[in-house]
Amino acid sequence: MNVVEKKMKLTSKKDFLKCFDRATPGSRWNGNYYTDLGTGVTSKNLMLIYQDTYIFGKGFMGVADVKVPEKYRKIR
């Protein structure tokens, strides 16, 4: 609906993850576009996403706020 009303862009990673945040209050999401390690080509129409983990009685771990270092994106 927000894309139709031009409040969000369909191709925006930030807007895409914001939709997941709204659907799961209190939780956080993060992700990145898929990169084929064999060819080095990044696919803008495929995103790998992950949700913050909830620990019962303690709350969310905060893993969605951790950035993956660039060196791990180039492991072969």
Image (spheres, rainbow, N blue to C red):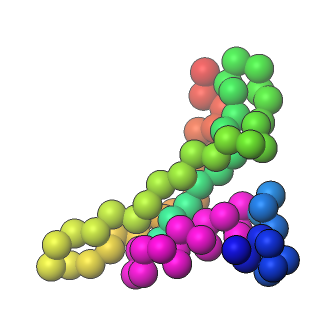
- Quadrant placement of the C terminus: top right
The percent position of residue 60, horizontal first and vertical second, equals 32, 74
Farthest top residue? 38
Residue 19 vertical position relative to residue 74 in the rendered view, above or below: below
Residue 63 vertical position relative to residue 74 in the rendered view, above or below: below
The percent position of residue 16, horizontal first and vertical second, equals 66, 64
The percent position of residue 12, horizontal first and vertical second, equals 78, 63
Residue 65 vertical position relative to residue 67 in the rendered view, above or below: below
Farthest right residue? 6
Q: Which residue is drawn at 78% across and 44% down?
A: 44
Which of these two is toward me, 45 or 28?
A: 45
Dividing the picture into quadrants, the one containing residue 48 is top right
Dividing the picture into quadrants, the one containing residue 51 is bottom left
Q: Residue at x 67, y 25 (%)?
A: 37
The percent position of residue 63, horizontal first and vertical second, equals 43, 64
Q: Report whether 63 appears left or right of 66.
A: left
Which of these two is toward me, 10 or 55?
A: 10
Marks counted in the figure total 0
Dividing the picture into quadrants, the one containing residue 58 is bottom left
Q: What range is drawn magenta here?
A: 13-27
